[in-house]
Image (spheres, grey):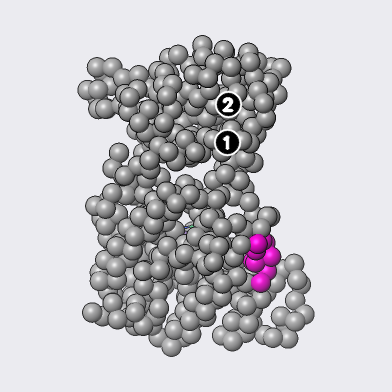
Amino acid sequence: MRYTAINRSFYIKNREKLAKELKPRSLAIFHSNDLMPTNADGTMKFRQNNDLFYFSGIDQEETVLLICPDFPNEAMREILFVRETNEHIAIWEGNKLTKTEAVEISGVNQIKWTSDYEGMLSQLMVYCDHVFLHTNEHRGASKEVETRNARFIKRIREVFPLHNYQRIAPIMEGLRAVKEQDEINQMQRACDITEKGFRRVLRFVKPGVKEYEIEAEFIHEFLRNGSRGFAYEPIIGSGENSCVLHYLENNKICNSGELILMDVGAEYGNYNADMTRTIPVNGRFNPRQKAVYEAVLRLKKEAVSMLRPGTVIQEYQKEVGKIMESELIGLGLLDRKEVRNQDPFNPLYRKYFMHGTSHHLGLDVHDIGPVYEPIKPGMVFTVEPGIYIREEKIGIRLENNYVIGQEENLDLMGNIPIELEEIEELMNA
Ligand code: GLY
Ligand code: MN
Ligand code: MN
């Protein structure tokens, strides 16, 4: 583990929160993610299942957590199964968690080897009526690949067909959306590492650099600061690529006079930063680029002031859209009269600003969390307006991460340069 872990008291508290949400005689079951294959004997980097991590802090494959808060035998109310190591694993893969280490990380006292799992599961199932299972219900989730949790659901329903099976997802959405200080600290670390990367890039960029060379500058700074890497595939798009929302090739030469849109964030301890900055390749914005940049920055500031406890994201998006309309009219991109007569379900601003302004952020970059309910203090959101003018090869997005506070929002990226003058100054220092 290369990051400083959150203290186990956080995971204990999370399990207590879960216990309050479950009906009597409930069992909640959480599995690790699979180690995903690539080709031949290759695998992707392991990424823990976020719900399992949220309740245990265990960052190791083949882990299972059972939670049955009212089980008559108190010692079996929480059981964590970890992979038993052996000489072969020790030689080829190195250390795996010992039972003592697993207790220290998670605060779960009952640690078993995964080989004991089937037997103990049966004991709990006989007592329980309700079984809460993990399904990935993110609105954007791809369902193509069957997860370990999905395989398990099929199997358990076959073996115990008469239990009452329920979704854990709605409970997780409520719990994970409101962050504890421990989580905010990890996210602040991720943002601070992202800042280091960005400052390095400001010194590095000049006409003739390649987009992937910029990517290399970021990852160098991320890794040397304890991050395991990018929070998501980085978007580094210069010139016309700044208008491609999910541009990932990052292979073009950056030319003088163009802008570079960089949507890049570091992960830290499985928590994420999600930053976007747009900078001029030659270190100076031209007047048109300046005008668009200032419009996006103004909009971002207004959006942050609207993102407060009680706000509902859907309504906020509509309000942001109205401000965007007037900015686009100011830039000569929309006509006031046409805006007045537009179809309200298909507003004209969407031609230049076609994505959402904010999403929850946390263990997932597009974190799970309610979007139809009022925002609560402790939630963390991105604010990321953008204007994309393909015919002018100008794409500008600015994105920071905010903790919603009772009195005011905390900008986790408050130290990352964003004002136009500061960007120019640092690029020309
Ligand atoms: N990096 C993905 C996003 O901004 O939502
Ligand atoms: Mn982003
Ligand atoms: Mn984002």
C-alpha gap between disc 2 and disc 1: 9 Å
Q: Earlier in the sequence, mark 2 or mark 1?
A: 1
Residue 316 falls within the magenta-colored stretch: yes
As displayed, is residue 357 above or below residue 101? below
- Dividing the picture into quadrants, the one containing residue 270 is top left
As displayed, is residue 391 above or below residue 288? above
Residue 98 falls within the magenta-colored stretch: no
Q: Main secondary structure of the magenta part?
A: helix
Please state which of residues 310 and 386 is positioned toward the viewer in this rendering.
Answer: 310
Say which mark, if any, is on residue 322: none
| Amino acid type, callout 2 | Pro
Q: Residue 429 in the image: state x and y as whole percent.
A: 23, 79
Image quadrant occupied by the N terminus: top left
Residue displayed at 38% across by 22% down = 83
Q: Which residue is mark 1?
A: 18
Say which mark, if any, is on residue 69: 2
For label 2, being within 8 Å of ligand 3 is answered no
User: Quick check: 246 left or right of 198?
Assistant: right
Residue 26 appearing in the image: yes
Mark 2, residues whose alpha carbon is within 10 Å: few (<14), some, or many (≥20)? many
Residue displayed at 28% across by 49% down = 226
As displayed, is residue 226 above or below residue 247? above
Residue displayed at 68% across by 55% down = 373
Q: Residue 234 in the image: state x and y as whole percent.
A: 40, 57
Q: Secondary structure at mark 2?
A: loop
Instruction: Write down the region rendered in magenta.
Output: 310-319
Residue displayed at 39% across by 80% down = 420
- Dividing the picture into quadrants, the one containing residue 425 is bottom left
Mark 1, residues whose alpha carbon is within 10 Å: few (<14), some, or many (≥20)? some
Are the residues tagged 2 and 1 within 8 Å (C-beta)?
yes
Please state which of residues 97 and 324 is positioned toward the viewer in this rendering.
Answer: 97
